[in-house]
Amino acid sequence: MAIKNDLILRAARGEKVERTPVWLMRQAGRVLPEYRKVRAKMKGFKELVETPEFACEVTIQPVDSLGVDAAIIFSDILVIPEAMGLPFQMIEAKGPWFEKTVKTSADIAQLRIAEAPDLHYVMDAIKLTISGLNNRVPLIGFAGAPWTIFAYMIEGSGSKTFSQAKKFLYAQPALAHQLLQKITDSTINYLKGQIAAGVDMLQLFDSWAGVLSPEQYDEFAMKYISQICNAITEVPLTVFAKDAHFARVSMGKLNCNVIGLDWTVDILESRKMIGDSKTLQGNMDPCLLYADYATIKKETVKMLKTFGPQKHIANLGHGIYPDIDKDKVICFVDTIKEFRF
Ligand code: CP3
C-alpha cells in the first residue's frame, strides 16, 4: 500500500510538493517525556536499541506527538563497529566508550566485514516499525559515514579534536585506507539490509567531518561516501556532513539525492556551490528552540523562504538538544507545516 504522506520522498527526488516537509535529527529522544519513560525502564541505552519492540515504540513517538513527516529508526551509528568486532558501552551522561580500539594492522585484520544478519535486531525493529506506522509516513534508515565510524574506532570515545584518529591518518595512511574500506563494505551491507527490511530513505551521518582539512576530507572521507552513494540506488539517500562547508562543491557531485546542511553555512551560497540538482536539508540552529515562540516562528519562516518552495526538507542543522521544551519543537514543526508560499 502507498504511504499516505510521502512529501519527504517526493521532495528528496526533486518532485513537486504542496508544502515543505519536516523531520528532526534526534527527534526520538530525551526531548520527549514519553521517551524518557520507556528509557527509564531499560538497563541502558543499548537495551532500548537492541529490543525491537521498544525501538519501534520510541521511533513512532515523535510521529504521534510532534507531527513530523517521517520517522527515523531508533538505533545508533556505533552498531557497525560493534558488528565488526569492537563492542561499545553507552555511559550515562558521558557518551560512547570502547574497551578495545584499533591500533595496529593485526587489529584491522581481525575485524570482520559486517553483514545485515549481524544487525538482525535493527532489521526486526525496522519491520515492526513499518507495520506500526501503518503507511502514515516514510521510515528513514541510517548509518554513520566511514570517517566518523573510523574516528570512534581509533579514539575509543568522543573527543573534541579526534587527534588520535587524525594522527592515524598522518602516520599510517595505508592502514587507515584499509580500515576505511572495511567500514565502507560493512556499511553498504548494513544499508542494503535496511532497504530489504523496508526503509523508504537513508541518511549518512558524518558528524566529525569538521576536524579534517579539505584535502584530508577528500582522501579519507569523500572517497568512501562516494562508494556508498554509488552502491545505494534503491531509495533516496541524504549525506549530512557536519561542519564540512569546504566540501560543498564535491557534495554536489555525489550520486545521492539530498545534502544536509548545518546552521553555520549560508543557504543561498550553499545552493550555488551544490547546484540545482540536489534537494537540500536543514538547517536551523538547534539553539533557536530555546527562544520565545514569536522568534521561533519568525526565524523558521525566514529559513523556509530562503530555501524556497521546492527541493527542501526542513530540519535542524544537527540533533535537538535534550533540554529543549517539547512545545517549542512543536512550534517549529507547526510553523513549517502551516506555511504556504
Ligand atoms: O531520533 C533519531 O535521530 C534517531 C536515533 C539516533 C541516535 N543516535 C539515538 C541516540 C541517531 C540517528 C543517532 C546517530 C548518532 N549517534 C550520531 C550521528 C548524529 C550526530 O548526533 O552527530 C552520533 C555521533 C552518535 C554517537 C552517539 N550516540 C553519541 C556521541 C551519544 C552520546 C551523546 C548523547 O546525546 O547522550 C549517543 C547516544 C544517543 N544516541 C542517544 C540517543 C537518543 C542519547 C542516549 C540516551 O537516551 O540515553
Image (cartoon, grey):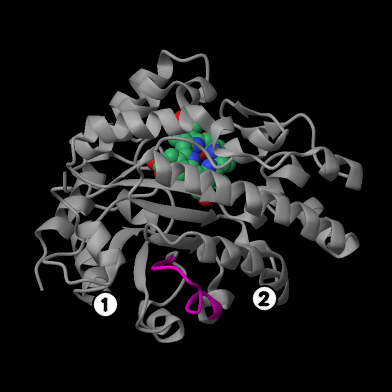
* Mark 2 lies on residue: 214
Give above or below for 332 relative to 84: below
- Indicate the secondary structure of the residue bearing disc 2: helix
Residue 331, percent from left and from top: 19, 49
What SS does tag 1 mark? helix
Residue drawn at the location 49% of the way across and 48% of the way down: 192
Q: Image quadrant for the N terminus?
A: top left
The nearer-to-camera label among 1 and 2 is 2
- Residue 280: image location, x then y, percent: 36, 70
The residue drawn where x is 73% and y is 33% is: 85
Circles 1 and 2: CB atoms closer than 8 Å: no
Name the image quarter holding residue 250.
bottom right
Q: Which residue is mark 1?
A: 306
Which residues fall within the magenta stretch?
250-261
The one nearer the camera, 90 or 199, is 199
N-term mark: 1 or 2: 2
